[in-house]
Image (spheres, rainbow, N blue to C red):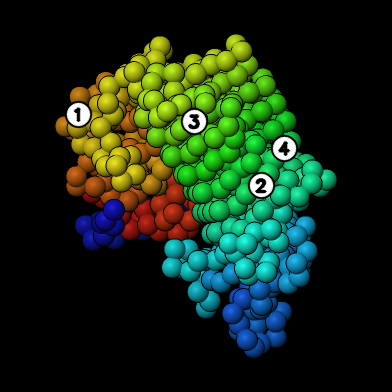
């Protein structure tokens, strides 16, 4: 999306705007400065060959493949760990029970080249930073890999892991210490850390949660992807158990598999929420569960503005299966999910067992589904054969959902583009005051594209957008630069785009 320069704004107007921003942001900035007093930036670079090895600068960064373990041990609450591209392991030995342990108050950021002086200078895509369970460096042999690459360590939400690929975990041990679950990350015992911009790829387990196992914990995942994980019996990507309430925003679940629940299993009084997520091409290979979701045992899952497509089950339902629980669906698209023999039927989109219910509204469900505002009309994806499930310009899902059912503070879609955008070529058919939100994980962006900073989709970056951004300060709700949090960098982008788009 283009950034429009502020050349048309008078100096006096710009000065007044900056003064207003300063007055509004000053209390938050002062509080942040106070909280960071005494905090440190600790540098980590696996490839470094010289220096003091004390983390005080890039030249003296902690070095070696276990440098991140050393840095975490040295960190205290308020510290930030800046980690350069490379591969890091939880131990230099073959001790499979060792992991990277999250720590309350410590933020760990990957994606640096080395040499950066500001957090927003990092480039996660260009500088892959890998946390690997391949202890012997002999994959595809995985019998000697870490049981869990990351442990939640009972850390709170202020424990942050941002900008990493987590791969190679193999939880094939005994149930002692949960060594048979959570190959990528084990989040148990009130572990409620925050994961942003992370990829969980090719992890596995024998019990449940190939990517992540969650029990009595409520972690948050923003802008994360879960790809090609094997979940053993329960949950290819996630096994969520026993009064856990994790939050998922702008996440991808692709190509995961398990006997029960190809992507996500929810069991035992849990209440997870999913917003702006894509659940695609996951497979339940056993006799029970759903290809995308299996929600059971008095749980309540909330699904908003998600796209759930082309998931498969060999025995039961390819899409959503709810057993003795409730799965609440709104503003979503459920399409092309298949069951035994590859059959794409109504029962393979949404199915209920043992008194389970799936209240669904303002959603597109193949073959139709009872509920307010629902449709069975083809959503006309852009290029489904190649895995692009954005809406095409003629999609009936455009401007057709319910504004009231978008969770508070959600202002962007799966791509980070504005969530409420009016398409002039589409007659509004949804509920609310224009702009009406679209169905599914992506908001259709008319051509020319909406400019960055136009959070309310009215074609201009103005005081209303500024208010939305400041109201979302410190969260991911109005993140403009894709780093997972609204901060000064996003404010600068909005001010730089001030005026008409």
Where does the image place residue 159, in percent across and percent down from the top left? 67, 53
Q: What crowding class fits label 4: few (fewer than 14 Cα within 10 Å), some (14-19), or many (20 or more)?
A: many
Give the camera-side residue of 474 and 205.
Answer: 205
Measured along the vertical axis of the image, is residue 430 above or below residue 5? above
Helix, strand or loop at label 4? It is strand
Answer whether labels 4 and 1 touch (C-beta < 8 Å).
Answer: no
The residue where tag 3 is placed is 313
Q: What crowding class fits label 3: few (fewer than 14 Cα within 10 Å), some (14-19), or many (20 or more)?
A: many
Mark before the other along the chain sequence, 2 or 1: 2
Marks 2 and 1 sit apart, C-alpha to C-alpha, by 47 Å
Mark before the other along the chain sequence, 4 or 3: 4
Closer to viewer: mark 2 or mark 4: 2
Please tell me which residue is depicted at 56% across the width and 72% down the height of the picture. 86
Answer whether labels 2 and 4 touch (C-beta < 8 Å).
Answer: no
Q: What crowding class fits label 2: few (fewer than 14 Cα within 10 Å), some (14-19), or many (20 or more)?
A: many
Helix, strand or loop at label 3? It is strand
Give the camera-side residue of 306 and 60.
Answer: 306
Please tell me which residue is depicted at 66% across the width and 77% down the height of the picture. 64
Marks 4 and 3 sit apart, C-alpha to C-alpha, by 25 Å
Please tell me the numbered disc located at residue 205: 2
Marks 4 and 1 sit apart, C-alpha to C-alpha, by 45 Å
Measured along the vertical axis of the image, is residue 326 above or below residue 60? above
Where does the image place residue 204, in percent across and percent down from the top left? 62, 49
Closer to viewer: mark 3 or mark 1: 3
The residue where tag 4 is placed is 215
Query: Is residue 481 in view?
Result: yes
Mark before the other along the chain sequence, 2 or 4: 2
């Amino acid at each position: 999306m283009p950034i429009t320069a502020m050349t048309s704004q008078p100096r006096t107007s710009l000065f007044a705007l900056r003064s207003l921003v300063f007055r509004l942001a000053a209390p938050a900035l002062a509080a942040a400065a106070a909280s960071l007093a005494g905090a440190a930036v600790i540098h980590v670079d696996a490839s470094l060959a010289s220096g003091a090895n004390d983390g005080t600068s890039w030249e003296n960064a902690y070095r070696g493949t276990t440098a991140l373990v050393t840095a975490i041990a040295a960190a205290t609450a308020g510290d930030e760990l800046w980690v350069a591209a490379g591969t890091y392991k939880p131990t230099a030995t073959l001790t499979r029970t060792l992991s990277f342990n999250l720590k309350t108050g410590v933020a760990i950021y990957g994606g640096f080249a080395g040499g950066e002086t500001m957090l927003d200078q990092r480039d996660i895509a260009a500088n892959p930073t890998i946390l690997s369970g391949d202890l012997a460096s002999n994959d595809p042999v995985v019998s000697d890999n870490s049981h869990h690459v990351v442990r939640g360590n009972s850390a709170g939400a202020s424990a942050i892991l941002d900008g990493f690929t987590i791969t190679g975990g193999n939880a094939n041990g005994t149930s002692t210490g949960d060594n048979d679950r959570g190959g990528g990350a084990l989040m148990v015992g009130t572990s409620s850390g925050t994961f942003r911009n992370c990829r969980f790829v090719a992890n596995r387990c024998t019990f449940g949660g190939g990517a992540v196992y969650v029990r009595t914990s409520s972690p948050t995942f923003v802008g994360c992807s879960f790809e090609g994980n094997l979940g053993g019996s329960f949950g290819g990507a996630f096994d969520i158990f026993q009064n856990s309430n994790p939050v998922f925003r702008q996440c991808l679940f692709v190509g995961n598999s398990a006997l029960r629940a190809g992507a996500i299993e929810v069991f035992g009084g849990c209440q997870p929420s999913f917003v702006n997520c894509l659940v695609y091409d996951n497979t339940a290979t056993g006799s029970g569960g759903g290809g995308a979701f299996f929600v059971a045992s008095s749980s309540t899952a909330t699904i908003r503005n998600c796209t759930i497509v082309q998931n498969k089950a060999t025995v039961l339902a390819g899409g959503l299966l709810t057993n003795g629980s409730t799965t609440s669906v709104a503003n979503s698209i459920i399409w092309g999910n298949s069951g035994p023999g590859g059959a794409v039927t109504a029962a393979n989109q949404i199915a209920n067992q043992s008194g389970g219910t799936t209240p669904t509204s303002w959603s597109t469900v193949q073959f139709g589904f009872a509920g307010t505002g629902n449709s069975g009309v083809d959503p006309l994806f852009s290029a489904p054969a190649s895995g692009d499930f954005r809406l095409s310009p003629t999609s009936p899902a455009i401007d057709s959902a319910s504004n009231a059912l978008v969770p508070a503070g959600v202002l962007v879609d799966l791509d980070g583009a504005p969530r409420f955008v009016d398409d002039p070529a589409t007659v509004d058919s949804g509920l609310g005051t224009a702009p009406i939100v679209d169905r599914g994980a992506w908001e259709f962006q008319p051509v020319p594209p909406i400019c960055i900073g136009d959070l309310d989709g009215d074609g201009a970056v103005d005081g209303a957008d500024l208010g939305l951004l400041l109201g979302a300060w410190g969260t991911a709700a109005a993140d403009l630069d894709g780093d997972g949090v609204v901060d000064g960098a996003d404010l600068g982008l909005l001010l730089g785009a001030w005026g008409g788009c």
